[in-house]
């Protein structure tokens, strides 16, 4: 089935050097892309064929492996060696399958288990070292947003709000959305694997454990659901959409119980709350081995299905919704849509989503009372330096350019806490902000670029700098923070004294000439020139050039 996600848009105009993708086809030829979702319970992969000129994508292959990364050490909460080896083996199989379908690029994201494990970052590095696969760690809310994109790629919301629920192994994501935006995003630490490990000790589950689990789930979901309901308009009645393996399995079991056959496709299958209660009652009264014999039940899922079913049932009760529609697309398809958005392949209906990064940055800037006119000037100066020196002094592309813009807008947000050492406060605020559309690695990079817009240069002994995953990201921070320093100097008085700037690079002399055009022809811009002379040293050392600046009285 081909699912159109938007009307055509112009392809990227320059290669994306950071993730290895370049628009070599001119935006007209089909190409294959793979997306991997490393979850708490399973690793899923989908391989799709993208038609840029429409743009659409068609699913051509799927892979799933239950690896149970959530089987962590109960005391240390570290990922176990056995679980990590299972995951590595599954990822190798995914890479082999993607290669067999000639996927030009493989995108991988990791969620709850990797976020929470003390050795999660180390395992991400091990995956990259052993398999050459870069895995992006995403926050709970970013996971929820991409689940929404996956659902939106195959469902028509008909101008009606929808509640989307995805029950994973470690967390449950609940989203309130319409066809243009997610209005509310939440991620709560109640998942089928987590709950089973922490609370289920009887087989079959005792009545006391069942009731305790119900109460615990209600308590955990209460805040998220209350906030969601406050977002609804009084006259709105949302539809409920369910994704994930737990919900799809429950739907299949119900269909086999009632109809004697498995729905094909499962997409659009409706399950009432009344019918769900009957399924949950039946499953809870059975032993693990009995559940594993049920038609439609995966043997490994039978261990955790009751806990997952309780989450769904209690959520439906608390939401006051009596029916659920199954959606077969979820996070991994959302990863595909997000990739298409960030590479300029989708506009129109999803344009608002395509601007999610920009809007998220501006929202955080306003939250911390950033002086926007000043920050925008600094960000624009930084981008001007980036653009005029691209392929002359640095190799970076569109994604790195966006990181620089974000850091430029937020570089001074730390003043909200204190002007003293505000660059360090900026790092903390950015790193812990709810910035949608960015991976954890990208957030770390933005925070570091902002951190080094003044004072000390990046050093390996700095904890924040050592958090960067590899040499490439450290070089990105080195280069972009040096550009940001120059940009900050160009508006030292924060009054827009410099109107524009032209860069002229002379490679034989290794000189970068900056022609600065003042806003006021009579303004000597002495403070800007002095500060530029002070700040340019880092740039000169980083790029091995000499920076020479002079005022141009005429544009």
Image (cartoon, rainbow, N blue to C red):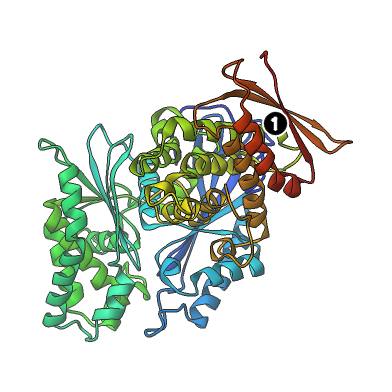
Q: Is residue 177 above or below residue 116?
A: above
Q: Is residue 153 left or right of residue 192?
A: right
Q: Is residue 289 above or below residue 337?
A: below
* Image x and y of residue 243, in percent: 32, 54
Residue at x 39%, y 33% (from the top left corner): 352
Residue at x 22%, y 35% (from the top left corner): 160
Q: Is residue 118 left or right of residue 212?
A: right
Residue at x 62%, y 65% (from the top left corner): 128
So how many labels did they put on this image? 1
Q: Is residue 345 left or right of residue 473?
A: left
Residue placed most toward the observer, 272 or 428 = 428
**Element on which disc 1 rests:** helix
Q: Looking at the image, can residue 329 be seen?
A: no
Q: Quadrant of residue 254?
A: bottom left
* Image x and y of residue 119, in percent: 50, 75
Residue farthest to the top, as pictured? 554
Disc 1 target residue: 388
* Image x and y of residue 530, in percent: 65, 36
Residue at x 23%, y 39% (from the top left corner): 161
* Image x and y of residue 58, in percent: 50, 43
Q: Quadrant of the N terminus?
A: top left
Q: Is residue 517 above or below residue 175?
A: above
Q: Quadrant of the C terminus?
A: top right
Q: Residues within 10 Å of mark 1 (few under 14, many from 20)?
A: some
Residue placed most toward the observer, 408 or 261 = 408
Residue placed most toward the observer, 250 or 497 = 497
Q: Quadrant of residue 11?
A: top right
């Amino acid at each position: 089935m081909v699912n159109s996600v938007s009307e055509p848009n112009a392809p990227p105009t320059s290669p994306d050097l950071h993730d290895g993708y370049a628009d070599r086809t001119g935006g007209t030829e089909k190409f294959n892309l793979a997306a991997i979702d490393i979850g708490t319970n399973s690793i899923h992969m989908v391989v799709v064929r993208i038609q840029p000129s429409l743009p659409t994508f068609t699913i051509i292959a799927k892979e799933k492996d239950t690896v149970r990364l959530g089987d962590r050490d109960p005391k240390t909460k570290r990922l176990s060696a056995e679980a990590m080896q299972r995951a590595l083996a599954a990822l190798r199989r995914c890479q082999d399958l993607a290669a067999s379908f000639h996927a030009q690029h493989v995108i991988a994201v990791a969620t709850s288990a990797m976020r929470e494990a003390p050795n999660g970052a180390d395992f991400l590095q091990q995956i990259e070292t052993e398999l050459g696969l870069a895995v992006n760690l995403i926050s709970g809310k970013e996971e929820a947003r991409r689940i929404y994109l996956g659902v939106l790629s195959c469902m028509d919301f008909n101008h009606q709000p929808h509640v989307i629920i995805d029950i994973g192994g470690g967390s449950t994501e609940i989203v309130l959305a319409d066809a243009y935006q997610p209005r509310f995003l939440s991620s709560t630490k109640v998942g089928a694997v987590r709950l089973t490990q922490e609370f289920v000790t009887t087989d079959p589950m005792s009545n006391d454990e069942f009731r305790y689990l119900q109460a615990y789930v209600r308590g955990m979901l209460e805040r998220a659901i209350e906030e969601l309901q406050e977002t609804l308009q009084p006259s709105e009645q949302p539809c409920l959409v369910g994704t994930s393996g737990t919900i799809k399995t429950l739907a299949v079991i119900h269909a086999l119980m009632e109809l004697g056959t498995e729905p094909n496709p499962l997409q659009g299958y409706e399950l009432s709350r009344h019918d769900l209660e009957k399924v949950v009652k039946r499953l809870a009264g059975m032993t693990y081995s009995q559940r594993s014999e049920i038609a439609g039940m995966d043997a490994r899922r039978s261990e955790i299905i009751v806990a997952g079913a309780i989450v769904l049932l209690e959520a439906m009760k608390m939401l006051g919704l009596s029916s659920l529609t199954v959606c077969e697309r979820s996070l991994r398809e959302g990863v595909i849509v997000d990739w298409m958005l960030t590479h300029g392949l989708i506009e129109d209906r999803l344009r608002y989503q395509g601007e999610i990064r920009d809007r998220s940055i501006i929202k955080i800037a306003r939250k911390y009372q950033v002086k926007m006119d000043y920050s925008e000037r600094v960000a624009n100066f930084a981008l001007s330096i980036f653009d005029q020196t691209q392929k002359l002094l640095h190799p970076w592309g569109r994604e790195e350019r966006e990181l620089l813009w974000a850091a430029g807008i937020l570089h001074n947000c730390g003043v909200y806490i204190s002007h003293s050492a505000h660059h360090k406060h900026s790092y903390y605020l950015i790193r812990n902000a709810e910035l949608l559309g960015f991976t954890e690695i990208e957030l770390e990079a933005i925070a570091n670029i902002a951190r080094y817009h003044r004072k000390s240069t990046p050093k390996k002994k700095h904890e924040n700098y050592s958090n960067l995953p590899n040499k490439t990201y450290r070089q990105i921070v080195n280069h972009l923070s040096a550009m940001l320093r120059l940009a900050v100097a160009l508006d030292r008085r924060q009054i827009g004294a410099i109107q524009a700037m032209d860069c002229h690079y002379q490679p034989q002399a290794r000189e970068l000439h900056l022609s600065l055009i003042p806003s006021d022809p009579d303004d000597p811009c002495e403070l800007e020139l002095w500060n530029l002379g002070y700040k340019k040293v880092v740039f000169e050392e980083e790029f091995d050039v000499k920076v020479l600046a002079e005022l141009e009285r005429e544009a």
